[in-house]
Image (tube, coloured by chain):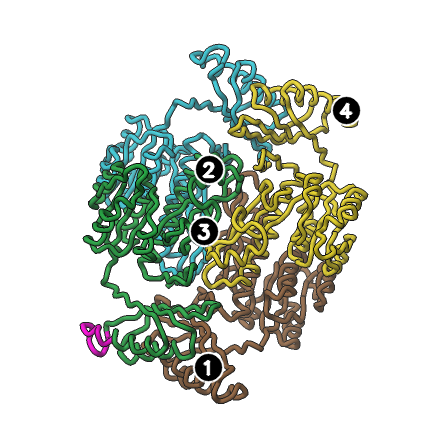
Chain colours: A brown, B cyan, C yellow, D green
Amino acid sequence: MVKCPDRKGVIAALAQLLYGLGCNILASDQFTAEEGVYFQRIRFDLTDMVVGTANKAVLERAIAEVADRFGMEWRLFYDGAVKRVAILVSRLDHCLYDILIRHRAGELKCEIPIIISNHPDLEGIATSFGIPFKHLPVAPGSGPEGKRSQIEALLEELGVDLIVLARYMQIFSEEFCSRNAMRTINIHHSFLPAFEGAKPYHRAYERGVKVIGATAHYATSELDAGPIIEQDVTRISHRDSVQDMIRKGRDLERLVLARALRSVLSDSVMVNGNRTVVFEI
Amino acid sequence: MVKCPDRKGVIAALAQLLYGLGCNILASDQFTAEEGVYFQRIRFDLTDMVVGTANKAVLERAIAEVADRFGMEWRLFYDGAVKRVAILVSRLDHCLYDILIRHRAGELKCEIPIIISNHPDLEGIATSFGIPFKHLPVAPGSGPEGKRSQIEALLEELGVDLIVLARYMQIFSEEFCSRNAMRTINIHHSFLPAFEGAKPYHRAYERGVKVIGATAHYATSELDAGPIIEQDVTRISHRDSVQDMIRKGRDLERLVLARALRSVLSDSVMVNGNRTVVFEI
Amino acid sequence: MVKCPDRKGVIAALAQLLYGLGCNILASDQFTAEEGVYFQRIRFDLTDMVVGTANKAVLERAIAEVADRFGMEWRLFYDGAVKRVAILVSRLDHCLYDILIRHRAGELKCEIPIIISNHPDLEGIATSFGIPFKHLPVAPGSGPEGKRSQIEALLEELGVDLIVLARYMQIFSEEFCSRNAMRTINIHHSFLPAFEGAKPYHRAYERGVKVIGATAHYATSELDAGPIIEQDVTRISHRDSVQDMIRKGRDLERLVLARALRSVLSDSVMVNGNRTVVFEI
Amino acid sequence: MVKCPDRKGVIAALAQLLYGLGCNILASDQFTAEEGVYFQRIRFDLTDMVVGTANKAVLERAIAEVADRFGMEWRLFYDGAVKRVAILVSRLDHCLYDILIRHRAGELKCEIPIIISNHPDLEGIATSFGIPFKHLPVAPGSGPEGKRSQIEALLEELGVDLIVLARYMQIFSEEFCSRNAMRTINIHHSFLPAFEGAKPYHRAYERGVKVIGATAHYATSELDAGPIIEQDVTRISHRDSVQDMIRKGRDLERLVLARALRSVLSDSVMVNGNRTVVFEI
């Protein structure tokens, strides 16, 4: 994936580079934001790379040269390199179950070395899927910051690439958020920016909306204001109580989080200021 | 339609009353809000009414008696009584066209005695559908309050029952709103309560949402905060510019406004605090 | 729930009957089909029933009398009477998991005394939810009819009220279907009547459709032609391979089956010829 | 737009060619079908073309050379070249109105030199939008083939590029279809392949489906079996009569037809056997 100022010749330079090295471009998508920033995602096959697949250094050096010429930020992901994902949960199990079932079904290309919770309730689910579970309680009033060293130490120790807050009911400190920026995904149970903060279904009920929603976004230090990766909604009527919304919302939350996670795991998401570019290839 | 505290025997009393008078109940829907308020909508046929269809007074007196017994608010709508609707527009024509086409197709059971605008642009459309058009310009800075007497006088003169703000770009005074409460429908181009106020598509673009929406609601003195009648959304992606959102939003706006208007015209909407009960029969 | 020819006074008679016995009507919905058949669903509270809650016989006799008068079919469901549901599966686990998770979360008011499969693969899932699992293999070429006595004997022994075919990949005999008519729910992975029969996603791919769907229906002896309870679709594009459709379809299948099951368990579904009336209360 | 067997170096060759000529690639999308066919759509800017914008011949010769090398089919569309669209209608006006309103709003980049109908009913609408209207009645039993010479002569005379059947209720001959293959778009009022042929809403009602749909497709000699460009559906319930479906379907039909037409007019649709590739850029 590359990101650079929009200039002529970028596509040609990258395509020529890959062709010259014997790489076959499998898919390519690009997007030029209104601000003149150019984003591109290219998937290519190294099998026939003339310099040998072992020689990734040559490839990376060649890309670095082009990148330098065009003022390009770039990241290269190898297909074999599976991301390591930590799931943080509290007491609600629907998002956790959903991720684990999809993972087992092969929908989510990642490893899950740990499930962390501030409550012990969901340990049985972790166990039934053979995933280690760590209970790190949060002292009342302290916030999980108190657990920072513990959580972050654990994540570091396990080599975690991505943190998924699957209905984790604690707010992280600004420091945690900035240290883990753009690698922490949260699911919020409203169609943000409506009903930011706590108890969105209760507030949706009070406002009398006719749709409810869910939003997967990168967690940032400003609560519920990070770049949105995916959103969806479902219709409700006057007959739906808050409890009905919570029930219907569970389906939304898990679908939206799963779609966002799948996009992030396939390296299809780039951040453009406070917006995201989500490639579909 | 009736509204009263939830008490035993309401349904039986009404059903018995209608049966006793020889009225055939065609459809009935009811809803008890959590606050213990009971709403019911009954459609019935007077054809075989024992006292004769001319004798509506008997029917109304009988209902009034039951209503009195149960502390019931009630409204009786006769099928022949077609509502008179004034449409207020500014320069955008998509909602106006949509209403007029549906009206001509027989989807909207109403009369449209007048289209009022603060601009002369859409007169041609009104004319092609044979509807009178009145241009009432608003002096800059004055707001349409300056036109209050003119607009309200016109509405009164024409016996207007319902006011539809079909992308009318002026804010009414508190006095206008309270005088016309629950008979003025507005279409807002966002999924309220997100992006209340002006330029919602621009703000949706800046926030980077993945869905945009539209909301039809009763206009109240608090801007964009009245009871919501209908909402819907459509998906967008990072590729959609503000202009694309405006284009996609036009389809949403007209569909949502049309559905809300249809519900209101069929007397299916009741207000419950700041929420609505929208019966589907 | 009642079903009878549409005649004046039905509503009044039932409402009066319940009122007279001291029952409070909690919700009521009705529908008159074009063929002149009247359907009604009434939920009422027996707590204050004048003859005492123990005396259900009085209630049932009273209803039977009214029913007789109006040529009415009727069924009475008591809230405490929880349905017993058998789930039949083959090798795919997503619908099974979904039902079990919703059941545990309290979304599905039923007991699940048995999971039956023609393969042993999913026994582990059954066990982790504490549900008995029975492996009843089907000899190749024989069809499950060979297992009829076994399956049906088991269902009878366990007092099963409802059979859910949660991606059970065997076709039942006509005799099984007619013996279990309107108590067997199947999930089909297309928007029926498109792509009836086998491999619908492959055929959807070949036809080049832009939406795929799922359908929950009562199983009848005519394959995939029984009354439809619930359907939904999702968009796809030219980029979606058959494998992508299968993946996206899993979400559809489980959502559609869950909604249908929930409606059936709450006694909200009535059959009207080959169509269903699905009440929303 | 190009279509060729999938081979290494295609992207690089095209990108290099355009870069060499000074053209700036604005957007590019590609897709490799499972059958090994490669599709690409590139939008580029000629403004800075080194050989001068007048010299399109150089560009086309250069593309032809690359195309020859890769066995590529290609089409080049110039932004200024606006397509000429003929609309064929019968008596229903909703799709016609919709296209004309969108056209006037600038949503559809095309010219509409003629509206042709086998009935005179919609002439007034054509006139109010300033579009010529031609009434070409079809003798009962003859089919529009009898009008072939007239319709096709008219289309040829007017230099029509694209034919839109906006609820045109006549079936064309095989000869007409093959002569106008992939330039005739039809809107069918069901989610094909369900309910091919006549009266789909009636048959949807009889089958008791819970969704209805609409499909825009290229018309081919096999009725309702041509490549699908766009589809969508809407939910219905047991309460919806055939008339309700027809009403709700009108909204679907016009939205689906408009989206398909917009894609075709922006040269985003390529045909891959009986499927379509619809690029989103």
Residue that badge 2 annotates: D202
Classify C118 as above or below B19.
below
**In the figure, C226 relative to D77: above or below?**
above
Q: Residue at x 50, y 11 (%)?
A: B50
Mark 4 → mark 3, Cα distance in angstroms: 54 Å
**CA distance for labels 2 and 4:** 44 Å
Q: Main secondary structure of the magenta part?
A: loop
Q: Mark 2 against mark 4, which lies toward the viewer? A: 2
Which numbered disc covers residue B194?
3
Quadrant where the N terminus of chain C lies?
top right
For residue A23, the mark is: 1
Taking the image as shown, residue C119 lies to the left or right of residue C193, namely right
Q: Residue D205 appears at what percent x and percent y?
A: 50, 38
Which segment is the magenta one?
Answer: D48-59
**Circle 3 — which element?**
loop
- Mark toward the viewer: 1 or 2: 2
Horizontal relation, residue C83 to residue D14: left or right: right
Identify which residue is drawn at 35% across, 73% down.
D72
Is residue D49 rendered magenta in the image? yes
Disc 2 residue crowd, few under 14, some 14–19, many 20+, Cα 10 Å: some
Q: Is residue A67 magenta?
A: no
Q: CA distance from mark 1 to mark 4?
A: 80 Å
Subunit ID for the residue under disc 2: D
